[in-house]
């Protein structure tokens, strides 16, 4: 009972002072800190501090994503011709070649990365460094077409900052049936590995207009929904503003970018976006203390990866783009010799051709429906 009262007092004081980094401090130090605050602060002063910090957090959460979206909206049309000038573009292989008079700009996700660099100043420095470096690696991959081994080796060092950020949050506790695994020593390394996997999961679950952005927004929104319901919005503003700002910045910028990437695409997002999106998702899961749930919200990506393993491991031939079959009726059909990804498999299940936008809508509906089930089970079962 005494411990519960102490914890509640600590939460109240830390909320009132917006102690965003208090979770990095040991329990004993936390108790000493609370005692010192109780003796040094008057109730009115604490209340005033609470209101001031609360409205500051609200302002940041509203203005930063808005500015990021406006910056992306204004800058993106100006960047697309520059990308084509540097030969960063290609033809849309899911559309008739004769209908395409010029190449579609690629690596448009660099604009979102620039926007993030500008408007993410309030975030923890470890988070910023790891996410920006992930996006830069994706841009380098777009330009130099890195081999797969470098896409795995380089992030091992590049994402050390994310592991350092995680160290202060304590261990991950995997609450599995009949066991409670505490991975306090391995967890920073596991977070880095998870981020590398996440980058590549987003990267290979692609192939139709809007899919990279759509899947990322859906996963990020449901992760935010879960953490908000679990912890409460006021608690997030007071104790986990990094999580809220990171999610808002990513979703707002991605929504603008989606307007250019949706069917018919005026721009391709490139590896710069998929690497950045995958790392943002893991960073949000870490800061929101929802790493285990985030894995289940990535079920579509995991299924696609599992189906793709025979090709990725070169057990069966792996074409570079793993294309769907475009027929004269304008619809996409699965190729019988290439069922090793979820897009091909979906078309086989439907047993008929689909227009590209129809396939995108079906995949998003499936992801949203299962994500609803995952979040509901995690919260209420």
Image (spheres, rainbow, N blue to C red):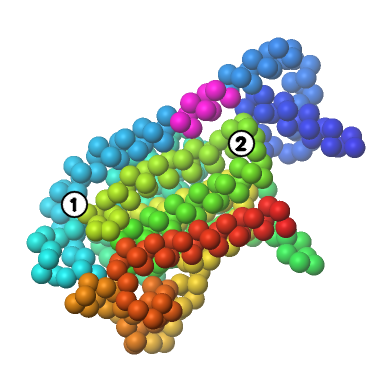
Tell me if 118 is positioned left or right of 7 in this view. left
- Magenta residues, as a range? 54-62
For mark 1, what is the residue? 83
Tell me if 159 is positioned left or right of 115 in this view. right
| Quadrant of residue 328 within the rendered picture | bottom left
Q: Residue at x 48, y 44 (%)?
A: 247
Query: Residue 59 magenta-drawn?
Result: yes
Q: Residue furthest right?
A: 1
Q: Residue at x 37, y 52 (%)?
A: 135
Tell me if 67 is positioned left or right of 267 in this view. right
Q: Are marks 2 and 1 in contact (CB under 8 Å)?
A: no
| Quadrant of residue 296 within the rendered picture | bottom right
Query: Residue 300 magenta-drawn?
Result: no
Q: Is residue 322 visible?
A: no
Q: Is residue 248 visible?
A: yes
Counting from the top left corner in percent of width and height, residue 269 is at 30, 55
SS at circle 2: helix
In front of the other: 329 or 262: 329
Counting from the top left corner in percent of width and height, residue 14 is at 69, 28
The CA distance from mark 2 to mark 1 is: 40 Å
Image disc number at residue 272: none
Mark 2 vs mark 1: give the one in front: 2
Q: Is residue 37 above or below residue 116?
A: above
Counting from the top left corner in percent of width and height, residue 217 is at 44, 52
Q: Residue at x 31, y 35 (%)?
A: 70
Q: Is residue 174 above or below residue 284?
A: below
For mark 2, what is the residue? 233
| Quadrant of residue 186 within the rendered picture | bottom right
Counting from the top left corner in percent of width and height, residue 318 is at 34, 81
SS at circle 1: helix
Query: Which secondary structure dominates the residues rendered in magenta?
Result: helix
């Amino acid at each position: 009972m005494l411990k519960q009262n102490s914890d509640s007092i600590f939460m109240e004081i830390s909320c009132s002072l917006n102690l965003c980094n208090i979770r990095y401090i040991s329990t004993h130090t936390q108790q000493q800190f609370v005692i010192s605050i109780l003796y040094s602060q008057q109730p009115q002063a604490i209340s005033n501090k609470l209101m001031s910090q609360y409205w500051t957090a609200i302002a940041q959460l509203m203005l930063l994503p808005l500015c990021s979206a406006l910056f992306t909206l204004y800058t993106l049309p100006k960047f697309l011709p520059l990308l084509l000038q540097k030969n960063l573009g290609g033809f849309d292989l899911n559309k008739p070649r004769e209908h395409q008079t010029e190449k579609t700009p690629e690596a448009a996700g660099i604009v979102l990365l620039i926007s993030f660099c500008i408007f993410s100043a309030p975030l923890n420095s470890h988070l910023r460094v790891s996410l920006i470096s992930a996006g830069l690696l994706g841009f380098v991959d777009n330009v130099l077409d890195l081999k797969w081994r470098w896409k795995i080796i380089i992030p091992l060092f590049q994402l050390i900052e994310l592991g350092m950020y995680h160290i202060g949050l304590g261990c991950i506790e995997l609450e599995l049936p009949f066991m409670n695994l505490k991975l306090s020593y391995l967890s920073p390394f596991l977070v880095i590995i998870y981020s590398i996997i996440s980058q590549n999961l987003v990267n290979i679950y692609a192939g139709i207009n809007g899919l990279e952005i759509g899947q990322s927004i859906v996963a990020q929104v449901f992760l935010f929904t879960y953490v908000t319901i679990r912890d409460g919005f006021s608690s997030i503003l007071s104790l986990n503003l990094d999580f809220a700002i990171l999610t808002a910045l990513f979703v707002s910028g991605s929504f603008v970018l989606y307007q250019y990437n949706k069917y018919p695409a005026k721009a391709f997002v490139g590896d710069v976006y998929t690497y950045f999106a995958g790392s943002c998702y893991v960073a949000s899961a870490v800061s929101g203390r929802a790493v285990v749930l985030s894995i289940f919200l990535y079920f579509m990506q995991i299924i696609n990866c599992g189906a793709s393993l025979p090709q990725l491991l070169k057990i069966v031939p792996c074409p570079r783009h793993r294309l769907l079959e475009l027929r004269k009726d304008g619809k996409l059909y699965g190729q019988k010799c290439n069922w090793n990804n979820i897009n091909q498999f979906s078309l086989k299940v439907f047993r008929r051709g689909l227009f590209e936008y129809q396939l995108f809508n079906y995949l998003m509906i499936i992801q949203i429906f299962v994500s609803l089930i995952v979040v509901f089970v995690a919260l209420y079962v």
